[in-house]
Amino acid sequence: MDEPARYRWIAAHILSREPELRGWLRRRLGALSSNDVDDLVQEAFARIWAADFSTIRNGRAYLYATVRHLLAEYARHRRIVPIELLGEIDSLSIISDEPGLDRRVGARQELDRLQAIVATLPAQCRRVFELRKYEGLSHRDIAQRMGLSEKTIENHLTRALARIAEVLAACSPSGEADIAEPSAHHAADTNRGTD
């Protein structure tokens, strides 16, 4: 990442969080002086500047994790540490906007199920759906790319969405469904809508 891009990333993801971070430090760690808070914030910014931004998924969570590590270092290096600071460092709950592991696993399972359903669509219908939903192309762009009319593209998308909805509605509570057997209505549609 070039230097101007690093400045923009820091401004958007880190510097905008400074007032929130300072307030959080004052509320949670009253034992720290104003100068200590300034030093922590400055050192956190310096460490984040040196980090590889491509590995940071959530700037806010990374900032708070960096400050937590700095607080632990601060406590280790000081000869006299206020006892309340030690307890407060251990009890810090770093706030994150990232979904939890259970939500990420559930989302991955839903995506896998959707991909399995899409894989059962007729080839042309599947390609239209993928271009529209995965690549974000317009109906016109898809029609030009595939040499089809826009109306045919609309028909393929309608059939794809109807098939996906039908399979999802038929899913058992465990999420399993018979996606390999299209309905009679779906089987009749597979031969229509091709130019």
Image: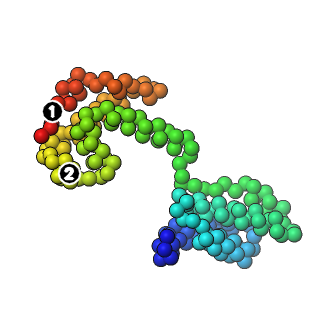
Q: Where is residue 79 in the image (x, y as percent from the top left)?
A: 87, 69
The location of residue 138, given as percent across then percent down, is 23, 53
Q: Name the residue: 60% across, 67% down.
A: 51
Give yes or no for contact between labels 2 and 1 (Cβ–Cβ under 8 Å).
no
The amino acid on which the numbered mark 2 sits, given as a three-letter code, is Arg
* The C terminus lies in quadrant: top left
State the CA–CA distance, disc 2 to disc 1. Answer: 19 Å
Using the rendered image of the protein, determine whether residue 72 is visible from the camera's viewpoint: yes
Q: Is 111 placed above or below 93 here?
A: above
Q: Which is more toward the observer, 86 or 144?
A: 144
Question: Residue at horizontal 28%, vertical 25%?
Answer: 182
Residue 11 appears in the rendering: no
> Furthest-right residue in view?
79
Helix, strand or loop status at disc 1: loop
Q: Nearer the viewer, residue 17 or 151?
A: 151
Residue under numbered circle 1: 192
Using the image, determine if residue 97 lies above or below residue 111: below
The colour scheme used here is: rainbow
Residue at numbered disc 2: 145
Q: Nearer the viewer, residue 192 or 166?
A: 192
**5 sits to left or right of 143:** right
Which of the 4 quarters of the picture holds residue 66?
Answer: bottom right
